[in-house]
Every structure is written in structure tokens, then in C-alpha cells.
Amino acid sequence: MDNTTTIDAKSSVKPPVSSVGVVGWARANLFNSWFNSILTLLTLLLLWKVIPPFVNWAFIDSLWWSTSAECKAAEGACWSIIPAKYRYILFGLYPYDSQWRPFLAIIILIGLLFYSRNRAHWKKSLAYAWLVGLILMGLLLRGGILGLASVESTLWGGLPLTLLLSVFGLTAAYPLGVLLALGRQSEMPAIKSICIIYIEMIRGVPLITLLFMSSIVFPLFLPEGVSINAILRAQVAIIMFTAAYIAEVVRGGLQGMATGQFEAAESLGLNYYQTMRLVILPQALKIVIPPTVSQLISALKDTSLVVIIALYDLLKTTQTTLSDPDWMGFSSEAYIFVALIYFACCYFMSSYSRRLEEELDTGL
Amino acid sequence: MNDKATAADNQLSDDAIIEIKGMHKWFGEFHVLQDINLTVQKRERIVICGPSGSGKSTLIRCINRLEEHQRGSIVVDGIELTNDIKNIEKVRTEVGMVFQHFNLFPHLTIVENLALGPIWVRKVPKKEAEETAMYYLEKVQIAEQAQKFPGQLSGGQQQRVAIARSLCMAPKVMLFDEPTSALDPEMIKEVLDVMIDLAREGMTMLVVTHEMGFAKSVAHRVLFMDYGQIVEQNTPDEFFDNPEHDRTKLFLSQILH
């Protein structure tokens, strides 16, 4: 046979079977030494011990639409707590009959967030849409006009409160953080030291302390008869706290910029603000997208700390539900439900940031 | 200034565009520029050479105030460089600068890189600025790359874009800070060709470079700097054929082999 001459050199040698496919992959990664083989087997054992019982508990033996009495008799998970109590978990003390209002507000917010995901939609009209949307959400929550019953902000709670604190907190903290970072880099000594003192002081204090100060210490300094809404005070504390951390992340990005970029912008005659806005910040902020998003995600989860100043955020309403004698003892189910909501919010942010990074990648 | 150089200057228009008198600069304790006196006429082309650390880059960076001088005066196009930020920005719009490492803005497309200065500094409408940008991209023969990002271009292409970016501001003077030093050998020519075209059109140019062929064919005057001083200046012919100072001779023997 002389067909060897006709065989294409590239295809004439195939890799050995043992190095490709599932078998090859497992050999290379799971069983490539005796130590790794033992680790693999131990891990498999552990998974075998954990996963089937969990699946049993969560899906097979579980109850989804039962009463609490049936639940107490059952072996598996009692997901029934969620259909039974979801309105309290999501909306807290908000008057039951008006809960469509916060629901609608959340729908508007989610709609705006998803619409804003696409950078092609970032036009002036989007800013107006946000403005109108925010006013609408505020009116829906507060009521008092158009025949809507007025609802005191002390009754706001659950998911709307968590989203309100997060969305406003993050959107206000980010620009403030950028300004603080620029201030810290400033050549003007007064501005520079103010920014450094601010950042270091806020970072040196736990968020809980700031929240306590905003709810207990701060009102002491207000004149008699003047009171500031508790939600607003918590909101300001969250903004101040997050901004300090964002500032340090952004400063890292600014320090990563080559001096050549500043010089090129300056030698074109651009002034400081133009240089920063058009040349430096777009690049620096892009570099720090991953740590910034980490910071924002952790800020979102930190909003749950407002329970300590008696605000009924999502976590607090869940805890309160669990003190209902009928549904006591089903905390795993309720907390898993809340965890999924938090996860959805955080995943939205991280997936968006990944997409943004890809879109802004210009190859240098 | 010696007689031959003056003779060369006399063929040019008489009015000076850059006047540096008794200028000194220190980096901390290090006296990097010592008593620099230099007058540049309109349309004059000067090549500055010298060993590394001799202060040649610092000298041209002082002209658009990327570096601050501590004594003496620098007047560019009738404006004295002081701490007045408005004056500095005005001078910078009149003086183009090309850097060793190109310093294009990596987050903007090529055409956006070119249009940025005119739009924000000269307040030219966007459409007009982009038309000007395309004109200069044609000129440096790179128009087909207009929509790409700097990271997608070769070094030589990036440097040509950087030159075009400066030209879009319609500068009266162009400063080149070792424009070919960071390039692979095969790309040096394409950049020098652009600079030679620019010279033909009568641009006032100060070029820090080790490209002695370029100096011979383009420069009116060659300056040799060492230890922060202008040691010698002459027409290219005289400079290369009859260097006066020992330091110049040594330098030339080192770079010309």
C-alpha cells in the first residue's frame, strides 16, 4: 500500500484515545497522581452524602401548597411558607390592600434596569425615563394624591425598601466615590487632605456604627421639632460608606494610568476637566470595573444591616415572618427564598459588568 | 550662535516664533538644563541630538510646559510661559507634540483620537472636525484605519496617527520627542517620510532624534546638547563634517560608526 503518500500530514497522526474526551480529561485533571485520585474519590463520596438527601428534602419529600399543620407532619421542605407569607416577606407592613403599588414600583424599576442594560439605549431620553420612573415610584409608594391612600414611610418595607436603598445608594455613591478619588489625587492641599480624612475615617468605621450614628446620634444635633426620615438617614449613611470604598478602587485605576496619557491630552490643550472626563476616567474606570462591581455587590448585601436600626428590609420581614407561631421552624425555606432574591440581584450586576467589559475592550 | 547658523537663519523669515533666554531647570538638586538660549524662526527646522540624559527631551518639553522651568524666559508665539494656566493652554494649542511612545488614546477610535482636540479645545463642530481628521489621515496614508482602535495598529501606523492628531490642531510649531526610537527598524522610514513631507510644507519643527540621515536632509540647524547645555549648533553640513567640540566629535563617532 502506498497510500501513505496521499495522506495529509496534518491528519496522519491522531492523538491517543486516552488523552481526549471525558476519559482523557478525567485522567489529566482528576487522577493524574495518587494524591489527586484520593482527593477525587473523597470529593465524590462527600457529594454522594450531601446531594441526594438535599434533593430529597427540597424536591421529593417537600410540600408546596399545604397548611402549616401538614408541613409540621412532613419530612421534607415546607415551601408552603412562601405562597402563604410571600406578601409579608416582600412588602412588610405596607397596607395589604395597597401592596399592588410597591409591586408596580418594583416592576417599573426592573423594567428600567433591563432597558438600561443595552448601551445603545443610553441617550438623553433614557435619563428622562429614569426621572419620570423614579417620581412615579415615589408617588406609588407614598400615595396621597390621585385617590391613592397616603402611606407613611415607616410602613415601607421588604423588597421595595431593599431595592430603594441599593439603587439610590449605589447610583449616588459611585459618582461621589469618583469625585473623592479625584480629590485625593488633587494638587490642592486643602481638597486633598479633606478627601483623605473623609476616606480614612469612613473606612475605619464599620457600617453598623455609621447606621447607629445616623439613627441615634445625628438626630440629637437637630433642632427641636425637626426630624429627618429614618430611611433617608440610613440611605445617606450607606452612600457615604460605599463612596469611600469606591474612591479607593477608582484611585487604583487612576494610578494605573500611564503619564503619557495625561501628557498627550495636555499637549493638545485640553484643560484638567476635559483631560479627566474625556481621556483619563473612561480608561481608569474601565480598568476597575471588576473591583468596582465587587464593591457594589457587597454594598447591596450590606443594606440588610439596616435591620439594626429597625427598618423592615427584606431580611427583617423574613425574620418577622418566622416569628409567626404557625410557621416557626421553617427558617431554612424562607432564608433560601430570600437568598435567591439577593442572588438574582447580584447576578444581574455581575453579568452586566462582564458584558460591559467585553463591549469596552478595544484591544489595548 | 555662530555665523554659519545665522546665515542659515537669514534665509528664513525674520520673526522668531520661539525665544528662550537664560533658561535653567532643575530636577530636585540635578541641574538638568543650564543657561539655555535658543531662538527659533518661523519655518525653521531644528534637530537636537546628544547623549541620553543630556536634557534634550526636557528642553522641548519645556516649550509646551510639560516641564516647568525655574529661571529665565520662554516665549512662544508672543506668549510668555508662566504659571498662568490660561497662557499654558493657549501655547499648547499652538504647539503640537509627538511622543516616543505615541500616547494615542486607546479607548477612542483613530478618527475620534484626531477629532478630540479640535472639538473640545477649538470648539469645531463634530462633523467638521471629523472631516479635518480624515484629511490628515489621508495625508499620513492611513485613512482606511479610521474606524479602528489604536491597539489594532502597528507602531509605525500609530506614530503616523499621532502626528496627524497633532496636525488637526493646526499647530504653528511641531515638537518631536524621539519619534522613531520605540519603532521596529522597518517602520522608521514610514514615519520619517511623513515628517519629511511636513518639512516640505514649511512646518516649524524641533526634532529630538538620533536619525542623522533625517538631520542631514531636513534640518536647517543641528543642536548638540550634553550635560544640560547646548554645546554646539551649526548647519548640518558643517556639523557633521567639521564638528568643533571634542564632545561633539566623540558623540558623532559613537553614533555614526
Image (spheres, coloured by chain):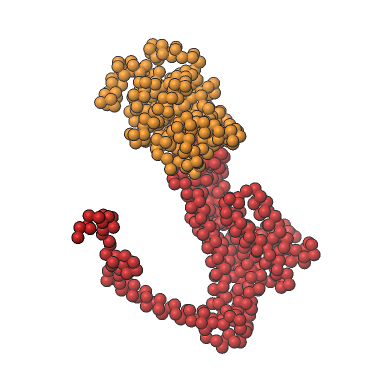
Chain colours: A red, B orange
Q: Is residue A272 visible?
A: no
- Against A272, residue B174 (above or below) is above
Q: Quadrant of the C terminus of chain A?
A: top left
Q: Position of residue B161 (x, y in %)?
A: 46, 35
Task: Answer with the quarter of the image where residue A239 lies.
Answer: bottom right
Quadrant the N terminus of chain A occupies: bottom left
Q: Residue at x 59, y 36 (%)?
A: B126
**Residue A360 coordinates in the image, percent (x, y):** 50, 49
Residue found at x 37% / y 74%:
A43
- In terms of image quadrants, where is residue A220? bottom right
Q: Nearer the viewer, residue B160 or B80?
A: B160
Which residue: 49% across, 14% down?
A: B13
Residue lying at 56% horizontally and 73% vertically, measured from the top left: A337
Image position of B142 (left or right of A116) = left
Q: Residue furthest left?
A: A1
Q: Where A253 falls versus B168 (above or below)?
A: below
Residue A74 seen in this snapshot = yes
Q: From this view, report whether residue B199 is shown above or below residue A329.
A: above
> Which residue occupies the foreground of this view, A339 or A63?
A63
